[in-house]
Amino acid sequence: MNRLLAILAALLLSASAFAATVADRSPFAQGHWWDSTRAGSGFEFFNVADQAMVIWYTYEESGRPVWYTAQGSVATMATQQWPLLKHRWENGRKGEATEVGWMRVSVSSSESATVAWNIRGTQGTNSIQPFIVSGVVNEVDHTGSYFDPANSGWGFTLTEQGDVLGGVLFAYDASGAPTWAAGFGRERGSVALSTFEGACPSCAWRASTPRDAGRLGLEFREEWKTVLRNNLTFAMAPGVNVDGSTVLQLSRPASSRPADRQLASFDQSAALKAYLDEGMLNVKGSFAGADFSPAPPSASSTPAFSGTNLQEKDVDEADLVKTDGRLVYTFEHRINYLLPQPKIRVAIVGQDGWTLGMRGSVTLAGEWTPYVSKAGLFLHGDKLVSVSSTGASTGWAVSAGWTRGTFQVEVMNRATPDDLPATLWRAEIEGTMVATRRIGDRLYVISRFVPYIQGFSYGVRSEPYLSRNRDLLAWARLEDLLPKMRVNGADAVTAMNASTMFAPPQGSRTPLADMIMVTVIDVASPRVLQTLGIIGTIETVYASTGNLYLASSRSEYRGPNAIVLALEPPALRTDIHQIRLGTDVMSIVASGTVEGYLGPDADKSAFRLSEHEGKLRAVSSSNTWWGSNKNRLTILEPSATAPGVLRTVSILPNAARPEPLGKPNELLFGTRFVADRLYAVTFKNIDPLYVIDMADSRDPRIAGALELPGFSDYLHPLANGLLLGFGKDAVPADTTGDAQFAWYQGLQLSLFDVSDAARPREIQRALMGKRGSESALMRSHHAFSVLPAADGSLAIALPARIHDGAHTCCGASAYYQWQYSGLLRYEVRGSTPADARLQALPFLVTHRSLPGNESFQPDDASAVNARSVLFRNGTVYVSSGKFWHLDNVGTIVGPY
């Protein structure tokens, strides 16, 4: 104990000199741990330099509470048995401890461990993990083990997570025997404690029986100093002076270990190599809502054509179709094949969309494989940029599915005599593209990379494969485990190094070989400007004009086939890392944590993030410790007192505003942030549209709600308090389960009045088809096109496959026959809630069933490849490299 005190004093004096490096990270999570199968007892774990200490809160065979301690060097964990000590209070002071057995702690990750123990000849083991009651990372965190240097021998182990405060007072009863009392709550300044009777470590488990023990007051003076106030009702040994005692942290304060709460750098290449070696052995080998803050369209600003539907104003996104209003670019596709090919098709539009003709095609210079999983285009001035990727076709493939992927960036000059683009520059970089954004001249490519070694057996932990894997890693160099880059066909070079790679808090995961890479490319003068990497998986990407946010889960919540587990892991948390996008270089700003995950679809999950006035808003979903509510709004911002931490400004629901965001077990569908409002749709039987007021970021609140049949999966804000919602109609299945289930039906487009946040209302709803109808807009927001007119009206278009007619069985669960596919067109006439109405326009039908042959004909209207461009005098529909055209008198031509 004395050695711990000396080490701690030295560390506190030098805390300001700590750097956030992997070497500074704690060997395990500091604080309370427990075995969830034996609730009612637990452990306090902490380390100071090379010394680790355990306080074990458990029970005697009689059922009375008792606590033990064990201490040893971190290096001896898993290999040595530390003496297990039982303490006594004698003659008004701490007496000599008695050795009653031993304890051995084996840590498998920072949040997973096994404790083996022996008490007077009785042995056992417990699998334990941190006791997590909130996913919030506190800006000032008082969590730690406290003692009174002037009255040592007893203490208080405190947990502060979000708005939850509590812990364990370990002291002595009137006879001097060790005892403890524990409690947790949401009150500040004091904690209600209880004493317990429960099952001893070797006894059959039974629920602990609590008895009220009064309250313990907490007056925080510093992060590491607290004054206790004794309002307890159980007797303690004479000389245990709790009331008025100034207790200090025996453990390390959170501010002295910044690497535990934020991204940490690899200060040496050897450290990165060792981490990736271990991560490679853990690679699995089996396969299987956002800020929309552009100003709403108005009569004073009427573009001549519709552009790519973006999540964030001035943050461009790659898409399959791009246009400057005169030329329309898209990829060529194989016949009846969804994947794009390395050829750009160019169409030319005349008279504001009245005519359409083909200009030609050009083959890209880069080499494409037949298995391009993702591709898109950017248009910037006289540059056309193609981005494409091979590798995992889904954002959720397990680690081994991300090996051997590459992405290509090809910058082309559009200023040519024949209007056909010509390649200027190209780069091929190892890794699979996840997302891309363009802000001004800067193109940001976010990719995921897992090293590939010839002969390595991924996901295998048995011999002789494990030994062979270790031999291969021993021979491999660090550069063999990092992504390579090749520019304009030159020799490959390593894209990153240890100084540009960072590791997040590991959580319950074992070390990973997965890497998230951000590559910055100057489009105006084509060249790679910078690369930056973060160890881990990628859940979603969101970008404002000034910051990039990368989200990654700390927990394994997907099985070997990459499907979300039916039972979520406990304490599911998502880390969000903020990267500043400077003119010259990117820089790490801070990291934060939210409870739950951001959704099962990487692209749609971006709509659950938003930046507004320097604050990040996030909507997550998960089971919570306090109840069954699954949906949660968290507002974060960079901390001014804890550099590198995104502090939690507020959450909703909370103790003061407990109304859940969604009824029990409802899933979160469409979300849209607009300035200081959030519109969110949840669904299981009916569609509650929630309006959340975030004008006071410290106190967000549900301002209003509207319940309707069906759900909206996509929300699009308009001017003057109008909102469009697109999704599906639904019919309740009253005889199914708890009668809260509903059958999806046809597509629906809803026009809402949200001008009064307290009273949202549906102005009008348009139903399209019946059960079986689908739309590409259900899969990509890029499938939605909008064009405002000078009179305030708004033209909108979306691809769809319509099923209708009759069915012969099965009631609401029956699918209807396919009727036609193409582009559905509507107009919002009027511009205020008083006069706005939806009006159907002539549809652009590309495929239609024939009498006697109603079988479905393949088309892209329900897939991910259908797009449209709206002009004042016509409409262009693009589907898998083919063009259709509709003029204003209703003439359809195509495909080209």
Image (spheres, grey):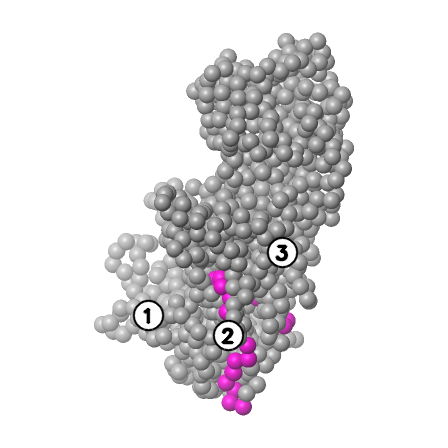
How crowded pointer 3 is (Cα within 10 Å; few <14, some 14-19, many 20+) is rated as some
- Taking the spot 62% from the left edge, 49% from the top edge, the residue there is 264
Residue sitting nearer the eye, 180 or 835: 180
Percent position (x, y) of residue 678? 59, 54
- Say which label, 1 or 3, has the lower sequence index: 3
Residue 385 appears in the picture as rendered:
yes
Could you tell me the amino acid type at mark 3?
A: Ser
Could you tell me the amino acid type at mark 2?
A: Gly
How crowded pointer 2 is (Cα within 10 Å; few <14, some 14-19, many 20+) is rated as few
Establish if 336 lies above or below 65. below
- Is there a contact, CB below 8 Å, between mark 2 and mark 1? no
The residue segment tinted magenta is 417-441
Residue sitting nearer the eye, 406 or 102: 102
Residue sitting nearer the eye, 638 or 189: 638
Question: What is the CA distance from the residue labelled 2 to the residue labelled 1?
Answer: 39 Å
Residue 774 picture quarter: bottom left
73 vs 892, left or right, is right
Percent position (x, y) of residue 175? 63, 9
Establish if 732 lies above or below 165. below
Circle 1 SS class: loop
Circle 3 SS class: helix
Question: What is the CA distance from the residue labelled 1 to the residue labelled 3?
Answer: 50 Å
Task: Give the residue at mark 1.
Answer: 858
Percent position (x, y) of residue 407? 49, 67
Task: Give the residue at mark 3.
Answer: 499
Q: Is residue 75 magenta?
A: no
Could you tell me the amino acid type at mark 1?
A: Pro
Question: What is the CA distance from the residue labelled 3 to the residue labelled 2?
Answer: 26 Å
Circle 2 SS class: loop
Establish if 345 lies above or below 615. below
Q: Nearer the viewer, mark 2 or mark 1?
A: 2
